[in-house]
Image (cartoon, rainbow, N blue to C red):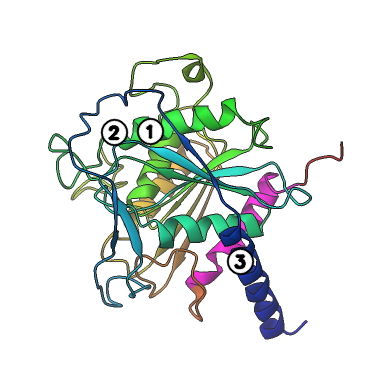
């Protein structure tokens, strides 16, 4: 098949999948029962806002998209693929936004649609933002990791109900959400909150992680991992993607993480796209960065996460 014809067919399939996903009402589940740990809830009502105007030197997607902020009650929004195509694999999706906002449309809903198109359940994690007064600017906020750890255990606890294989639960994140994905993938051996129920007895280790143009992975002014990040035994396989001209989160964040994973013997794959900047999400473009999703799907297939479930 001619490459253009193949790409056009893929784009049409994606639009059809997007239309189907938009028509279906996703399931929304609160992560925490009752009071949310370490949360005062006094930052005002949760709200949508539009992303700021940025130029192509900063981001690839320059038009405003919907964001969510003032989140005090974290949730999961679950988009499932057609039952007859479902692989049983699921991914938690962590939108970026500097731990101030969540790029809900670009790095949440659109990502869930892409995942459904490759027969994967997409679960958007609405974690707590903005950073609270005791979470300093320029450092990762601490509360979102508790939300992510709880979310992985919660999904695993309801895997049978949601048609998910408990050994095929991964996490994908963008920008600050990429840091959150890596933090969850490397902090599974110690929770950041006191367990509250039986769900917290279930593993919070993701089975794979996909950080995309991540920030907060590199120490300031040092070629080493940021404080608080480590690569313990049992760290799952990781796929990293980044823009070579990213000035918001320079590619060194992903490069240093890749090297640390390699030294620790963790299976990892790294893609750096020359001249690409920040914030490309899964949007199609004539730039090579838009092929990262195809490379990622091939990696997932090679890792065994896109194999169809056996017929019952």
Q: Secondary structure at mark 1?
A: helix
| Cα distance between the residues tagged 2 and 3 | 34 Å
Q: Residue 166 lies in what quarter of the image?
A: top right
- The answer to whether mark 1 and mark 2 are in CB contact below 8 A is yes
Q: Residue 133 lies in what quarter of the image?
A: top left
Where is 71 relative to 117, above or below? Answer: above
Q: Which of the image's four quarters has the C terminus?
A: top right
Where is 221 relative to 244, above or below? Answer: above
| Cα distance between the residues tagged 1 and 3 | 30 Å
Q: Position of residue 137 (x, y in %)?
A: 15, 46
Nearer to us of marks 2 and 3 is 3
Q: Position of residue 216 (x, y in %)?
A: 28, 47
Start and end of the magenta stretch?
289-307
Q: In percent of the image, x 39 and y 52: which residue is there?
A: 95
- Is 2 or 284 nearer to us in this picture? 284
Name the residue beneath numbered marker 1. 147
Name the residue beneath numbered marker 2. 143
Name the residue beneath numbered marker 3. 19
Nearer to us of marks 1 and 3 is 3
Q: Residue 90 lies in what quarter of the image?
A: top right
Q: In percent of the image, x 76 and y 52: which residue is there?
A: 85
């Amino acid at each position: 098949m001619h490459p253009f014809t193949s790409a056009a067919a893929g784009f049409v399939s994606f639009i059809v999948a997007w239309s189907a996903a938009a028509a279906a009402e996703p399931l929304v589940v609160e992560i925490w029962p009752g009071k949310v740990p370490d949360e005062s809830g006094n930052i005002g009502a949760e709200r949508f806002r539009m992303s700021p105007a940025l130029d192509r030197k900063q981001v690839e997607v320059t038009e405003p998209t919907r964001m969510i902020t003032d989140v005090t009650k974290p949730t999961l929004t679950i988009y499932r693929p057609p039952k007859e195509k479902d692989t049983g694999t699921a991914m938690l999706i962590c939108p970026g936004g500097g731990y101030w906002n969540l790029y809900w449309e670009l790095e949440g809903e659109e990502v869930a649609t892409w995942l459904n198109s490759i027969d994967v359940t997409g679960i958007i994690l609405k974690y707590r933002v903005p950073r609270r007064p005791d979470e300093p600017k320029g450092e990762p906020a601490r509360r979102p990791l508790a939300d992510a750890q709880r979310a992985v255990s919660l999904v695993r606890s309801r895997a049978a109900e949601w048609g998910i294989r408990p050994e095929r639960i991964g996490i994908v994140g963008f920008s600050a959400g990429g840091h959150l994905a890596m933090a969850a993938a490397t902090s599974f051996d110690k929770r950041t909150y006191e367990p509250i129920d039986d769900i917290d007895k279930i593993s919070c280790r993701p089975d794979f992680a996909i950080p995309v143009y991540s920030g907060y992975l590199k120490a300031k002014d040092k070629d080493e991992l940021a404080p608080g990040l480590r690569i313990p035994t049992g760290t799952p396989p990781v796929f990293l993607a980044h823009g070579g001209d990213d000035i918001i989160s320079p590619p060194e964040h992903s490069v240093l993480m890749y090297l640390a994973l390699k030294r620790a013997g963790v299976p990892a794959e790294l893609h750096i796209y020359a001249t690409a900047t920040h914030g490309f999400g899964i949007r199609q473009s004539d730039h090579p960065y838009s092929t990262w999703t195809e490379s990622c799907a091939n990696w997932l297939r090679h890792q065994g996460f896109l194999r169809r479930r056996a017929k019952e």
